[in-house]
Amino acid sequence: MVARLINEDEIARMREAGRLAASVLEMIGEHVVPGVSTEHLNELCHHMIVDELDCIPAPLNYTNGPDTPPFPKSICTSVNHVVCHGIPSEKKILKKGDIVNIDVTVIRDGFHGDTSKMYFAGEPTVLAERLVRVTQECLYRGIEAVRAGARLGDIGHAIQSHAEANHFSVVREFCGHGIGRRFHDEPQVVHYGRPNTGMVLEEGMTFTIEPMINAGKRHVRILPDHWTVVTKDHKLSAQWEHTILVTTTGAEVLTRRAEESLPG
Ligand code: MF3
Ligand code: CO
Ligand code: CO
């Protein structure tokens, strides 16, 4: 079933989950520096989510099915050529010039808020800076395509056309998703497509948009840990994610941060 909020009480609870998830990304920024381990970032986020926000970190022990082990940490940390679902580790120490996606999903009062952003450890290269900026623009263009009556293909087209105009590629194997009481619900929100195709958006639907954009080719591979997704050519990848509520006039961005000027 497509994730859809049916009354003001559910909308209020999704707003709260989104706001709390966003606050974790706001907290962690100053800690993303050369020399820190991704496990330390995980511990800081876990502590805030559980002890300060009174939420559940949705990734911890999350399972994809019987064939994959549960995800062992509370956030995903995806560095450089890691596309998504990077597992925090004491052994992964950030170095100057690294780019890292931190992906936070909290459960609050039964509802999920899911959001991620890119951080720089020290000064990025010109290419890294451009990839990260264009990927954020892709997310924003996707959000701008959202309103009741628009279609999923409009979102995918907005993202794909901007990425490819900048000579980057769009990852196809992973996509945005309906979200609400369930972490990963219908519909699948792919980040490529043609205008005026796919499911028609209706007021009250909630889903994520989370484009993964590669500096090289779009192809990816999963490491033997069953989770970490990397680019096949080992070139850089970036991702930004928001949880969105469809309204008659546009999108309400439930995971908006204070630094962003976005509807929501
Ligand atoms: N937060 C990711 C998403 O955007 C999913 C992470 S699932 C995990 O959908 F198990 F890898 F954490
Ligand atoms: Co998501
Ligand atoms: Co996420």
Image (cartoon, helix red, strand yellow):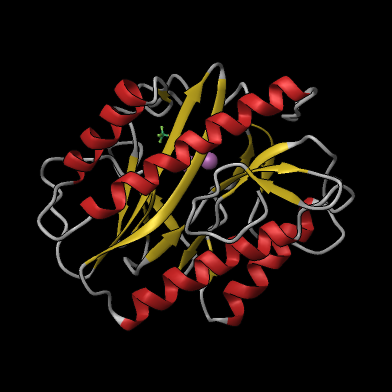
Q: Position of residue 184 (x, y in %)?
A: 58, 31
- Residue nearer the viewer, 203 or 211: 203
Quarter of the figure that contains the N terminus: top right
- Residue nearer the viewer, 169 or 43: 43
Q: Give the residue at x 14% y 63%.
A: 95
Residue 92 in the figure: left or right of residue 240: left
- Residue nearer the viewer, 221 or 71: 71
Q: Position of residue 216 (x, y in %)?
A: 43, 73
Residue 46 in the figure: left or right of residue 172: left
Residue sitting at the far right: 149
Residue 28 versus residue 21 in the image, above or below:
below
Where is residue 15, by image quadrant? top right
Q: Give the residue at x 62% y 21%.
A: 181
Q: Is residue 73 visible?
A: no
Q: Give the residue at x 57% y 69%.
A: 137
Q: Position of residue 57 (x, y in %)?
A: 39, 26
Residue 162 versus residue 218 in the image, above or below:
below
